[in-house]
Image: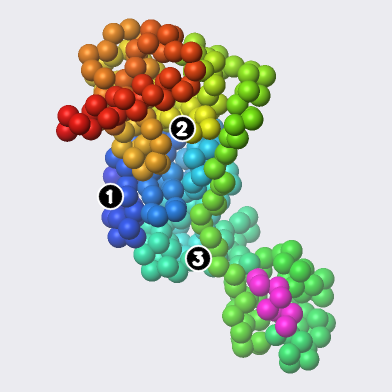
Amino acid sequence: MTKEILIHQIIDVLKQAGFTVSKRCNIRPRSFDLAARNSGTLLFCKVLYNIDGLNEETAREMKSLARYLGGSALLVGAKTRDQLLEDSVVYMRYDIPAVNIQTLYDYFVEEMPPLVSAAPGGLYVSINGDVLKDARMEISMSIGSLASELGVSRRTISKYEDGGMDASIDIVLHMEELLDIALAKSIDILQRFEKKAIQAEHVEKLKEEAAPDDGVLNMMYSLGYQIMSTSQAPFKAISKNTSDTLLTGISTYSSAMIKRADLMSSISSVTRTKSVFIIDGKTKSENVLNTVLIEKRELDRLSGNEELSELIEERIKKHNSEI
């Protein structure tokens, strides 16, 4: 299987599960390959044939984007080191869940969450400690008796019941057979982040923070936006105030800029944000699809984020009326 095939399979699975999927991010570098939304779930998906190819910087940006926009980061691949990823197993890379295509399908389409996580030393299952304790007491089995039956220490059983230790698959299967009850806890591969909210009273405090190094982003900051710069996304930053969240690009007007603006339009539609490109110099149009193009000199004349919001809305309405 190639990465190209894997990406097409992922898109197919997400669409089967009712997701709206963005255009593929095919501009390097890229912190994610696809953005997708299904009702309240926003997903930033990175696709790597070998999941060990994820580096710390990319993972950090994926998590920041998810946190800033109220979504989840997910890695989908086919292998790790010299072996294929197993079905229904969750692997972790820099605190981002990683799964294969079958696990993705089971989770989103079949609504069957995985039960097993991979960790150094093997595969493990998280146990519902309260269920274990209740089942053990129901048949009047002591901690010592259960420990002896499983070949582990009393302390280990106590940790299982306290929820402080995962168990190997063999141990869990043995306990479930002894107690005649399901003990494994399912794994939610969507590590949802609460969207960073900005209250009105916090906007003034932004001026006390360090301004971005980039000149244009510094202008946005001066207008009252909170800025999260990116290094690998198709956009330069996310600019946010109390009412708007803007995917923000910066460039001269060019064919490469148009390509990025087109991709930003697709991503903003999925993330339910607005998309704006600040043009250094002259621009030949005011929009690329849903991405509003604003010349830097226009930005320089604005006195606050309300004026920028009005300009963006005006150009969006004008674009929509011309469609």
How packed mark 1 is, by other alpha carbons closer than 10 Å (few <14, some 14-19, many 20 or more), is few
Q: Residue at x 52, y 29 (%)?
A: 241
Question: Would you place residue 59 above or below residue 307 in this image?
Answer: below
Residue 6: x, y in percent? Answer: 32, 50
Q: Amino acid at mark 2?
A: Asp
Q: Amino acid at mark 1?
A: His
Q: Which mark is residue 244?
A: 2
Q: Which secondary structure lies at badge 2?
A: loop
Q: Are marks 2 and 3 in contact (CB under 8 Å)?
A: no
Q: Which residue is mark 1?
A: 8
Q: Residue at x 57, y 39 (%)?
A: 196
Give the position of the C terminus as an image quadrant.
Answer: top left
Pick whichever of labels 1 and 2 is earlier in the sequence. Answer: 1
Pick whichever of labels 2 and 3 is earlier in the sequence. Answer: 3
Res 148 → quadrant: bottom right
For marks 1 and 2, give the one nearer the viewer.
2
Marks 1 and 2, how far apart at CA: 33 Å
Highlighted range, magenta: 127-134
State whether the magenta stretch is mostly helix, strand or loop.
helix
Residue 230: x, y in percent? Answer: 49, 27
Count numbered badges in the picture: 3
Question: Would you place residue 142 above or below residue 116 in this image?
Answer: below
Marks 2 and 3, how far apart at CA: 37 Å
Q: Which mark is residue 114?
A: 3
Colour mode? Answer: rainbow
Left or right side of 71 for 151:
right
Res 157 → quadrant: bottom right
Q: Are marks 1 and 2 in contact (CB under 8 Å)?
A: no
